[in-house]
Amino acid sequence: MNPILLAVLIVSGIGLLLGAFLVLANRFFAVEEDETVKELCAILPGANCGACGFSGCSGYAAALAENKQTETTRCPVGGNETAQKIAALLGVAAGEVAVKKARVRCQGFYDAKGKKSIYEGISSCHAATMLYGGDSACIYGCLGYGDCVGACDKQAISICGGVALVTPSLCKGCGKCVTACPKHIIEMVSEKESAYVPCSNKDKGAQTKKVCQTGCLGCKMCAKVCEAGAIRFEGGLAVIDDSLCTGCGKCIAACKFGVIKSYSPFA
């Protein structure tokens, strides 16, 4: 027999045997997909952000279907509408989704902060941070290269004057920007009116003033006028507890440096 023809027949035979094996394996070893999981996945937004506490929407759906997780309100992106649909499918009572928004704790715009070096690498906050903490004179603040912008699916974050800004009305509370920020200056906060300090510099006031003109100097005037006891200090940085803040605005008026701002989740 022609050796070429023989080789073709052998290869074809092997192919047929492997094909038959795959068909049989698919038939006998196939894992049946839970229909409830499929229906839940269709309800969930598919953001796969992990804000629910699971690896993604499929993980949350599987936990709900297997009754390992009974909270139908763990998806901030889907909100109350998604929670109600999940509850209706599972035949349980729907709760209220605690919506949170992203907020940036920095206001060190170009005209307020200095540079300690010239960075000409990849336009990435993570990459810049690997070089001595980044090019900003303030080692705590926003670098402005937009890793958070790239992580946001809702276009809720933009870079303005070298600082990330969040548009609360567009934010769905997925938290991807929090994970993306190497400086850890983005936080998720409750959807309520409150005062906050857009600064993360914990150095003493004199050192903060050297690197940024809009940083908190830790003068404690804000704490003296706060009747709710909502303000504490971490080093030289004032931190406002949103759960205690009444939104009275007295601390904003008392801050002679104009550091404390009013946060509105409806902006």
Image: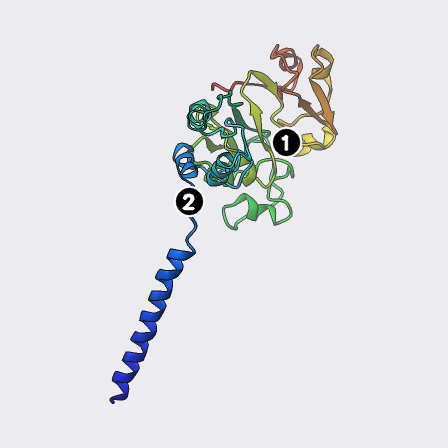
The quarter of the rendered structure image containing the N terminus is bottom left
| Closer to us: 246 or 104 | 246
Q: Secondary structure at mark 1?
A: loop
Specify which label sits upstream in the sequence, 2 or 1.
Answer: 2
| Residue on which the image places disc 1 | 212
CB within 8 Å, label 2 to label 1: no
| Amino acid type assigned to the residue bearing label 1 in the image | Cys
Dot in front, 2 or 1 = 2
Percent across and percent down for residue 219 are 73, 21
Q: Amino acid at mark 2?
A: Glu
Residue 118, visible in the rendered structure:
no
Question: What numbered label is drawn on residue 52?
Answer: none
Report the side of 9 relative to 34 (left or right): left
**Is the residue marked by circle 1 packed among few (<14), some (14-19), or many (20+) residues within 10 Å?**
many
Up-down: is 124 above or below 170? below
What is the distance, in whole Å, between disc 2 and disc 1 at their CAs?
A: 56 Å
Asked if one can make out residue 129 in the rendered structure from this viewpoint, the answer is yes
Q: Residue at x 42, y 44 (%)?
A: 33
Does 4 sit above or below residue 24? below
Question: Residue 2, position in %: x, y?
Answer: 24, 88
Q: Nearer the viewer, residue 205 or 90?
A: 90
* SS at circle 2: loop
Q: Quadrant of residue 203?
A: top right
Please give the residue where the numbered disc 2 appears in the rendered image.
33
Instruction: Give residue 8's position: percent from left, percent from top.
Output: 28, 79
